[in-house]
């Protein structure tokens, strides 16, 4: 390609490179830089016989440069509003969650008194096994045993409920 032919196509090729970079996700300033880099590479390739389709090359080079540029950037943190929008459950999910919470609270209330007390002291109040033992006046090994029984009973009831829901 001669210098005159390249100069005649340069404006159109630059616009193609800008469009390709913007389509690939580059902002306007970055797209300008990518277009410049694309034009420089095309200029360096002007005598290459493979440059029979400069429009295709311009678009491809610009797209690849834009993708490479985006890969180099650190991921942007989500602002609080975006992350809150992502975490908002649908009305159906909220209803199911509320129903599940009520069901679980009812099962916890139906535990024997000591198991209920131990579970509450451990899970809600984050008390140590020794603290719970001294509060209830029982041995720490008994606290561990009763806590394991309470958890196992709740787990079994949850599994039964899931199996029932699947049927």
Image (cartoon, rainbow, N blue to C red):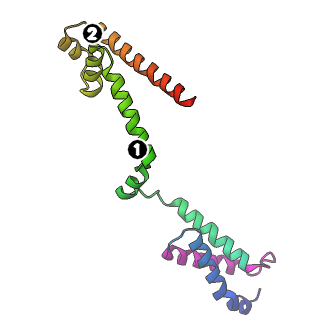
Q: Quadrant of residue 153?
A: top left
Front-lying residue, 18 or 134: 134
Specify which label sits upstream in the sequence, 2 or 1.
1
SS at mark 2 in the image? helix
Task: Pick the quarter of the image with the C terminus.
Answer: top right
Tell me the residue at 50%/72% (across/down).
Answer: 27
Q: Tell me the crowding category of disc 1: few under 14, some 14 to 19, or many 20 or more residues within 10 angstroms, Cα based.
A: few
* In the displayed structure image, the side of residue 4 where residue 36 appears, left or right: left
Q: Is residue 12 magenta?
A: no
Give the answer, above or below, for where 109 lies relative to 33.
Answer: above
Q: Is residue 48 magenta?
A: yes
Q: How many marks?
A: 2
Q: Tell me the crowding category of disc 2: few under 14, some 14 to 19, or many 20 or more residues within 10 angstroms, Cα based.
A: some
Percent x, y of residue 96: 43, 39
Give the answer, above or below, for where 37 lies relative to 118.
Answer: below
Q: CA distance from mark 2 to mark 1?
A: 39 Å
Residue underneath mark 1: 94
Percent x, y of residue 51: 77, 77
SS at mark 1 in the image? helix
Percent x, y of residue 18: 59, 78
Give, as a single range, the part of the protein colored magenta: 28-54
What secondary structure characterizes most of the magenta part?
helix
Tell me the residue at 54%/25% (across/down).
Answer: 163
- Mark in the foreground, 2 or 1: 1
Q: Quadrant of residue 48?
A: bottom right
* In the displayed structure image, the side of residue 104 where residue 35 appears, left or right: right
Percent x, y of residue 112: 30, 14
Q: Which disc number belongs to residue 140?
A: 2
């Amino acid at each position: 390609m001669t210098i005159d032919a390249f100069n005649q196509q340069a404006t159109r090729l630059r616009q193609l490179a800008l469009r390709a970079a913007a389509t690939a996700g580059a902002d306007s300033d970055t797209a300008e830089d990518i277009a410049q880099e694309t034009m420089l590479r095309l200029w360096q390739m002007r005598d290459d016989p493979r440059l029979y389709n400069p429009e295709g090359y311009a678009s491809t080079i610009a797209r690849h440069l834009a993708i490479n540029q985006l890969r180099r950037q650190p991921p942007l943190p989500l602002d609080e509003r975006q992350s809150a929008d992502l975490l908002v459950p649908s009305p159906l999910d909220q209803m199911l969650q509320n129903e599940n919470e009520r069901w679980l609270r009812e099962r916890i209330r139906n535990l024997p008194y000591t198991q209920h007390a131990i579970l509450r002291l451990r899970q809600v109040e984050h008390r140590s096994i020794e603290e719970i033992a001294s509060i209830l006046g029982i041995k720490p090994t008994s606290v561990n045993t009763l806590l394991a029984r309470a958890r196992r009973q709740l787990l079994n009831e949850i599994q039964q409920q899931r199996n029932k829901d699947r049927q």
